[in-house]
């Protein structure tokens, strides 16, 4: 990792070659290690290959634009801090980029001193982020549940986690598929956890599949979320990797296994199938999870969950499952007065 004294690893993605050259010279002169690419696809490739601290992305580039590169980068476990360079002075693109997780933006024409300051600040942010990630990596992902069906699902996942091979998690969004995939990975102990979002491959390009599969080699876990959105040939690539590379594939889908149309090569290699029941079918879980989230978000002296609020929560259908419940409780805790969460604090339809 770079710090102030050794400089940062900086990627410049800029299609105006003269400008890219100027930036490169300037930043190298400030002690940074600089790589330059001239289009979005090359930028994303570079970010996937090398752990840059900061990426300066031009918004308008051939192929993928800066925002698409930013999106792709944000999928990686430790993305660089992104500074977006807007060409036409429109603030809208810059704001959109910030919403997508960019660190900051700079409008052309800019002064080199501005870029210098931004790169230094972004590097500092990146250093802090790394330190936080190291701490956050410690707590185990947890599934709290009183539902026998979900308890069985967790037990099955833990049982098969140590062996390499394929696991299919079927459940509505927010039921804990990602959490279970991480649990399986943690139980297996070791190797990287690599996220491949089937729904994002269309934007990121098919090469991303090979790269993510490659990254999970050697005992790692490939989490193929929304696996049914992968094209058939990409599904076959994942299937082939299961035969030839030492990795674990955890695939997830919102579809029920019987209505899931997968390429047969992949389907037959996902030998363990686990169904996660939706929250509305898990008696007792709504209240127990709500109380757990109140404690989690309530700080030093968390409010109490009133009976009326618990009953209101239990009447809701939870289309977004636990993820939705978590957000509702987070908001309610912030709004709670007099140490009690009551129905008026719940933002429910
Ligand atoms: N049974 C559970 N106990 C505690 N926390 C849970 C449980 N199920 C889910 N969560 C939490 O709810 C949130 C959503 O879970 P998760 O991301 O695993 O769901 P998902 O099915 O992968 O949904 P998505 O694909 O939309 O992310 C996470 O913050 C997770 O920690």
Image (tube, rainbow, N blue to C red):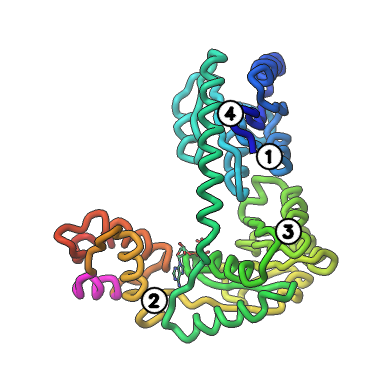
Residue 236 drawn at (x, y percent): 79, 63
Work out how far the residue at label 3 is from the one at label 1, CA to CA, in angstroms: 17 Å
Q: At numbered mark 3, what does the secondary structure look like: helix, strand or loop?
A: helix
Which secondary structure, mark 2? helix
Q: Nearer the viewer, residue 325 or 96?
A: 325
Which element is circle 4 on? loop
> Between marks 2 and 3, how big is the CA–CA gap?
35 Å
Tell me: is circle 3 under 8 Å from ligand 1: no
Residue denoted by label 1:
47
Do callouts 1 and 4 mark residues in contact (Cβ within 8 Å)? no
Residue under label 3, please give it: 216
**Nearer the camera: disc 1 or disc 4:** 4
Query: Relative to the observer, which residue lies in front, 219 or 258?
Result: 219
Instruction: Locate the N terminus and report the quarter of the image it occupies.
Output: top right
Query: Residue under circle 2?
Result: 280
Are dots 2 and 4 in contact, CB under 8 Å? no
Q: Which residue is painted at 64% across and 45% down in the image?
A: 203
Q: Residue furthest bottom?
A: 148
Of tags 3 and 4, the one toward the viewer is: 4
Classify 10 Å Cα crowding around label 2: few (below 14), some (14-19), many (20 and above). some
Q: Earlier in the sequence, mark 1 or mark 2?
A: 1
Q: Is residue 292 above or below residue 92?
A: below
Ligand 1 closer than 8 Å to label 4 CB: no
> Does residue 203 appear in the picture of this structure?
yes
Residue span colored magenta: 305-314
Res 109 visible? no
Q: Residues within 10 Å of mark 1 (few under 14, many from 20)?
A: many
Q: Badge 4, how many Cα within 10 Å: few under 14, some, many 20+?
A: few
Measuring 31% from the left and 71% from the top, which residue is drawn there? 291
């Amino acid at each position: 990792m770079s710090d102030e004294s050794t400089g940062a690893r900086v990627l410049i993605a800029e299609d105006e070659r003269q400008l890219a050259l100027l930036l490169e010279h300037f930043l190298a002169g400030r002690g940074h290690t600089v790589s330059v690419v001239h289009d979005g696809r090359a930028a994303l490739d570079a970010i996937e290959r090398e752990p840059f601290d900061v990426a300066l992305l031009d918004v308008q580039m051939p192929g993928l634009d800066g925002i698409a590169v930013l999106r792709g980068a944000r999928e990686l476990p430790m993305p660089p801090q992104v500074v977006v360079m807007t060409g036409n002075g429109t603030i809208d693109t810059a704001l959109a980029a910030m919403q997508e997780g960019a660190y900051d933006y700079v409008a052309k024409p800019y002064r080199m001193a501005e870029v210098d300051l931004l790169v230094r600040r972004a590097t500092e942010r990146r250093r802090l982020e790394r330190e936080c990630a190291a701490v956050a990596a410690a707590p185990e992902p947890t599934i709290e549940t009183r539902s026998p069906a979900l308890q069985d699902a967790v037990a099955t996942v833990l049982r098969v986690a140590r062996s390499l091979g394929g696991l299919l998690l079927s459940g509505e969004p927010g039921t804990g598929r990602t959490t279970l995939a991480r649990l399986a990975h943690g139980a297996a102990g070791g190797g990287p956890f690599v996220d491949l979002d089937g729904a994002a491959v269309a934007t990121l390009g098919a090469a991303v599949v090979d790269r993510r599969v490659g990254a999970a080699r050697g005992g790692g876990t490939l989490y193929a979320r929304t696996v049914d959105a992968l094209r058939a040939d990409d599904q076959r690539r994942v299937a082939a990797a299961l035969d030839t590379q030492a990795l674990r594939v955890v695939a997830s889908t919102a579809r029920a296994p019987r209505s899931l149309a997968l390429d047969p090569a992949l389907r037959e290699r996902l030998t363990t199938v686990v169904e996660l029941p939706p929250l509305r079918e898990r008696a007792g879980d709504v209240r127990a999870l709500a109380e757990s989230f109140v404690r989690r978000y309530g700080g030093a002296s968390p409010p109490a969950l009133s009976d009326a609020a618990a009953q209101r929560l239990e009447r809701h259908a939870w289309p977004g499952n636990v993820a939705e419940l978590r957000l509702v409780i987070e908001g309610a805790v912030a709004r709670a007065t007099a140490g009690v969460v009551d129905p008026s604090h719940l933002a429910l339809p």
